[in-house]
Image: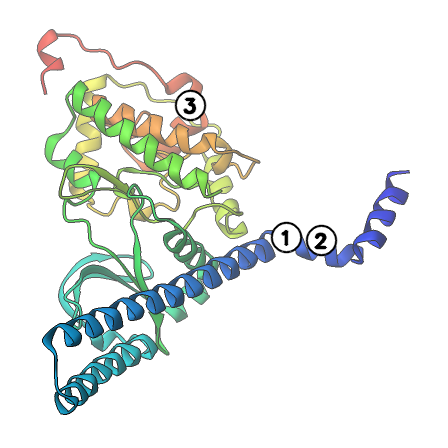
Amino acid sequence: MDTAKNATTMKQTGFQLWERELLESSEVKRKATVAQLYFLDYYFQSLGYLASRKERRARFDADTTKRQLTAAEYSKEFKSYCGRERVLLRKRRAKLRVEQFHIIAQVGQGGYGEVFLARKQETGEVCALKKMRKRTLSKMDEVRHVLVERDILTATKTPWLVRLLYAFQDSQHVYLAMEYVPGGDFRTLLNNSGVLKEEHARFYISEMFVAVNELHKLGYIHRDLKPENFLVDGTGHVKLTDFGLATGALNPRRIESLKIKLDKVKDNQVVYRSTLERRSIYRSVRHEDPRYADSIVGSPDYMAPEVLRGKPYTYSVDYWSLGCIFFEFLAGFPPFSGGTPEETWTNLKNWTKVLRRPEYDKPEDLIF
């Protein structure tokens, strides 16, 4: 009966089964959303330009009328006005090139490319210019993740998510010019402070929840939240960034890699350590390897078990990650960190046994 009902529905909509399946696929829905955003942005920009052009013409007419110019003087002023309008039109049509950005300094390095502090020469805008190698993205099957990141950055107008200013490409690279956030990321803050006071921890975790909620409103799940993904702006408020793993399905090879790592430690015994010992070990690991978080796909210290196992999940996996970050704010280490990668995976495998409230032998140990 269901089959007959579905067949009737197909006939009514005029689509065959394979066509409906194609239309309902996540990739087609993503492209449809992107197309909608593109045309909305295109017409918004076009209508905005027309409105501003009318305003400029009205100001020009009002100014020339007030000055009571002669015909010759008006002709000269009008010619100058038209020249300025032509310059604005040429700028609107011009394609962006990396040469239009002055590179100030390199501020980041990742597996796919570099991040630079740059200034757009025409406008003087300071931005974070992300430069990614096309060959590497294609080789590592990361093109879709870059598209997702671009889509999110384009769709958002909220102050809680980092804004995309420009996106362009050349034959070798893809470029994302994003809002520059001068305060650095939360990893740097935690490395410098060790732990946060309770009032500071409450403030920052509250803002992180708001930022993640804004992402969820757009229909995305981040899945890879960690302190490095949260930036602090010039006013001390939080912004969420790095959406490369957001939503959709993880690369099957990544899922298999995560499962293998979990399976390898299934017979390992959990090593129970004191709170101070775990904090000391974690700080030592961080100090010895500044790129610790980049060395493990998906940052397992903060990743929910269902994501690691490749099982179905919901928005709640981001709140698991926020809980791990909040724990680190107050304890000085994530709840499942270990002295070695194998120990961390063992702790994640046995998270119900490992997750415990930090305990301190002496009151002075609570003073950080």
Q: Which mark is residue 351?
A: 3
Measured as percent of width and height from the top left, residue 288 is found at: 17, 42
The reply to whether discs 1 and 3 touch (Cβ–Cβ < 8 Å) is no
Check disc 2 and report the residue beneath it: 21
Front position in the image: 241 or 65: 65
Judge the density around disc 3: few (<14), some (14-19), many (≥20) Cα neighbours within 10 Å. Answer: some
- Secondary structure of the residue carrying tag 2 is helix
Front position in the image: 83 or 94: 83
Note whether 136 is above or below 304 in the view shown.
Answer: below
Measured as percent of width and height from the top left, residue 329 is found at: 22, 26
Label 1 sits on what residue type? Ser
Note whether 127 is above or below 305 in the view shown.
Answer: below
The structure residue drawn at horizontal position 27% and vertical position 83%, both measured from the top left corner, is: 86
Measured as percent of width and height from the top left, residue 156 is found at: 37, 49
- How far apart, in angstroms, are the residues tagged by discs 1 and 3? 34 Å
**Which one is closest to the eye, mark 1 or mark 3?**
1
Check disc 1 and report the residue beneath it: 25
The reply to whether discs 1 and 2 touch (Cβ–Cβ < 8 Å) is yes
Judge the density around disc 2: few (<14), some (14-19), many (≥20) Cα neighbours within 10 Å. Answer: few
